[in-house]
Image (spheres, rainbow, N blue to C red):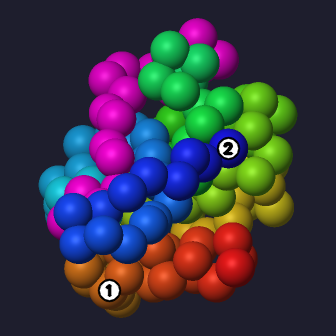
Amino acid sequence: MADCSARADGGHTEERLALVAGPDEHGLGEELAALGVEIRRIEGLVTADTLSESGIDEATYLVLTDVDEATGIPVAKEANPDVLAVTYADRSLPEFVAGVADLAIDPALMGPETVAEELVADDAERTE
């Protein structure tokens, strides 16, 4: 899923890709990018086609900031069972998809910088 690439400091890092769908008004995509995660934005509906075009098969994270697009989570998981499906929105996920998502975080409870740091740290632990 992820390739190993050289860093400027001579070390190596696993490349991480996040697909971000929704308005991202809190800047979670930018915070992930600041930690070295490649960001690809999905504009409009989250469908099998838009997920595929965006690179779901190689994605580390699927970040939804609009729960109206939650139907994309099971589609993403079918294409890439290892993708970490995260919602970062102030509304709850619909019941039919709540059991498929890995994390649902309310922006009022945790800021985007903290969420990004925790996601990257958790992924680093999972891949060790």
- Give percent across and percent down for residue 8: 21, 63
Q: Residue at x 44, y 66 (%)?
A: 12
**Residue 26 visible within the image:** yes
Q: Residue 114 carries which label?
A: 1
> Going 24% across and 43% down the picture, which residue do you hit?
23
Q: Nearer the viewer, residue 69 or 10?
A: 10
Could you tell me if residue 74 is visible in this image? no
Instruction: Report helix, strand or loop for mark 2.
Output: loop
Name the one closer to the observer, 66 or 75: 75
Residue 95 in the figure: left or right of residue 5: right
Across and down, in percent, residue 52 comes to 59, 18
| Residue 124 position in % (x across, y down) | 57, 77
Tell me the number on the disc at residue 78: none
Q: Determine whether 89 is above or below 111 in the image.
A: above
Residue holding disc 2: 1
State the residue at coordinates (69%, 66%).
102
> Does residue 118 sit above or below 34 in this rendering?
below
Check residue 40 for magenta coloring: yes
Provide the secondary structure element on which disc 1 rests.
Answer: helix
Q: Residues within 10 Å of mark 2 (few under 14, many from 20)?
A: few
**Residue 109, relative to residue 30: is it above or below?**
below
The C terminus sits in image quarter: bottom right
Amino acid at pointer 2: Met
Q: Which residue is situated farthest in the front direction here?
A: 10
Position of the N terminus, as image quadrant, is top right
Q: What stretch is highlighted in magenta?
A: 33-50
